[in-house]
Image (cartoon, rainbow, N blue to C red):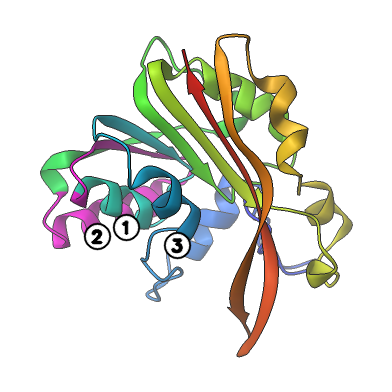
Amino acid sequence: MSQHQHDHDDAPDYFEQAGWDERYSGPEKIWSGKPNPQLVAEVSGLTPGTAMDLGCGEGGDVIWLAQQGWTVTGADFSPEGLARASRHATEAGVGDRTDWWQVDARIFDAGGRQFDLVTTHFLHPGGAMVDVVGRLTAAVAPGGHLLVVGHAPSEVFEQLSRKQHDAMWHAADLLPALTDDFEVLVVEDRPRVAERDGTTTEIEDATLLARRR
């Protein structure tokens, strides 16, 4: 469920589980393993507790959170991705601070589970992201934080398909998902320098941070 979809008829559909299972089934590591920068920026000052990372992929953010003292649930709809993430967490020595949950963000139901931190990064579900965020609010414990980061629309992504462009959003677009018991702390499309195909470019991370009262 990411923007990284090739615009070819025979390419895997990365808005669906099967596409990501195919991608994660290969031998190559897909992501860097480093934590996403907005996670580090916004969470480093928080007191560790329980956390959930939705769309955790290979587990880079989960591992970083566990290394900071959080007890973390990594959630994703790809069992192949979760298997990789579990192996990486064990290799990093934080397997005892992590667990894993196979769930599709589009039909996410917290089922009464709550966490001190709920986070998701670059989840583009092929539908209304505001609906996903609305579902995530129920998983945030009182006094806890919700951090949602994604790709803001930009000319940098002009090569992507219309479906991929439609899956992007601005941070302010997500505000209607928050209930009255949330205090908005950050709502901005935050510039970040990234390297793509060997060239350095500036992109914007749509960043929403809110605290449940």
Say which amino acid is labelled 2. Answer: His
Say which amino acid is labelled 1. Answer: Arg
Q: Nearer the viewer, residue 44 or 195?
A: 44
Closer to viewer: mark 2 or mark 3: 2
Q: Nearer the viewer, residue 51 or 165?
A: 51
Tell me how far mark 1 sits from mark 2, CA to CA.
Answer: 6 Å
Asked if the residues shown at circle 3 and circle 1 are in contact, with their CB atoms under 8 angstroms apart, the answer is yes
Residue position for label 2? 88
How many marks do you count on the picture?
A: 3
Residue at the image position 35 percent from the left and 58 percent from the top: 60
Q: Is label 1 in a helix, a strand or a loop?
A: helix
188, above or below 172, in the image: below
Spot occupied by residue 192 in the image (x, y as percentages of width and height): 61, 66
Asked if the residues shown at circle 2 and circle 3 are in contact, with their CB atoms under 8 angstroms apart, the answer is no
Residue range in magenta is 67-94
Residue position for label 1? 84
Is residue 90 rendered magenta in the image? yes
Instruction: Say whether residue 168 is left or right of residue 133.
Output: right
Tell me how far mark 2 sits from mark 3, CA to CA.
Answer: 13 Å
Q: Is label 3 in a helix, a strand or a loop?
A: helix
Asked if the residues shown at circle 1 and circle 2 are in contact, with their CB atoms under 8 angstroms apart, the answer is yes
Residue position for label 3? 24
Say which amino acid is labelled 3. Answer: Tyr
Spot occupied by residue 201 in the image (x, y as percentages of width and height): 68, 79
> Neighbour class for label 3 at 10 Å: few (<14), some, many (≥20)?
many
